Image (cartoon, rainbow, N blue to C red):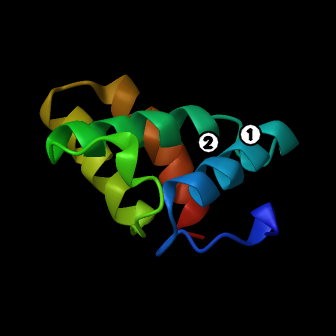
């Protein structure tokens, strides 16, 4: 797999973890890995699932958007902006 070409609209946790790690390590989006891990944890907490489903396909743009909304609703502007940097990068 080429980690620079992951489909963020339909990929599993493993591929998206690799992609976000690549983006952080390469400097293309330094906060990508942190934002992805937090968004994944937010998603699993919200739907009562665990990381047993590492291979289920997800639309990670939507997962990030949900995480951003959660932070915004909680009044956590810093958390919102941390996610937004990654979301903006992916939404190009």
Residue in the picture at 79% in, 64% down? 4
Query: In which quadrant of the rendered view does residue 56 lie?
Result: bottom left
Q: Which mark is residue 8?
A: none
Q: Position of residue 2 (x, y in %)?
A: 82, 68
Q: Is residue 57 left or right of residue 22?
A: left
Residue in the picture at 77% in, 62% down? 3
Q: Secondary structure at mark 1?
A: helix
Q: Which mark is residue 32?
A: 2
Q: Which mark is residue 24?
A: 1
Query: In which quadrant of the rendered view does residue 1 lie?
Result: bottom right
Question: Up-down: is 7 above or below 15?
Answer: below
Asked if the residues shown at circle 1 and circle 2 are in contact, with their CB atoms under 8 angstroms apart, the answer is yes
Residue in the picture at 61% in, 42% down? 32
Q: Is residue 83 left or right of residue 92?
A: left
> 84 or 35, which lies in front?
35
Looking at the image, how many numbered discs can be counted on the residues? 2
Q: Residues within 10 Å of mark 1 (few under 14, many from 20)?
A: some
| Mark 1 and mark 2: Cα distance apart in space | 5 Å
> Of marks 1 and 2, which one's residue comes earlier in the chain?
1
Q: Residues within 10 Å of mark 2 (few under 14, many from 20)?
A: many
Which quarter of the figure is the C terminus placed in?
Answer: bottom right
Q: Position of residue 78 (x, y in %)?
A: 39, 24
Q: Secondary structure at mark 2?
A: helix
Q: Position of residue 86 (x, y in %)?
A: 55, 48
Q: Position of residue 11 (x, y in %)?
A: 52, 69
Residue in the picture at 43% in, 61% down? 60
> 79 or 53, which lies in front?
53
């Amino acid at each position: 797999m080429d980690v620079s070409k992951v489909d963020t609209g339909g990929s599993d946790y493993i591929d998206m973890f690799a992609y976000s790690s690549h983006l952080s390590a390469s400097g293309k989006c330094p906060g990508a890995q942190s934002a992805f891990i937090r968004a994944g944890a937010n998603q699993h907490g919200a739907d009562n699932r665990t990381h047993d489903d590492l291979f289920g396909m997800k639309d990670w743009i939507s997962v990030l958007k949900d995480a951003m909304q959660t932070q915004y609703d909680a009044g956590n502007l810093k958390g919102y902006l941390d996610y937004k940097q990654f979301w903006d990068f992916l939404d190009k």
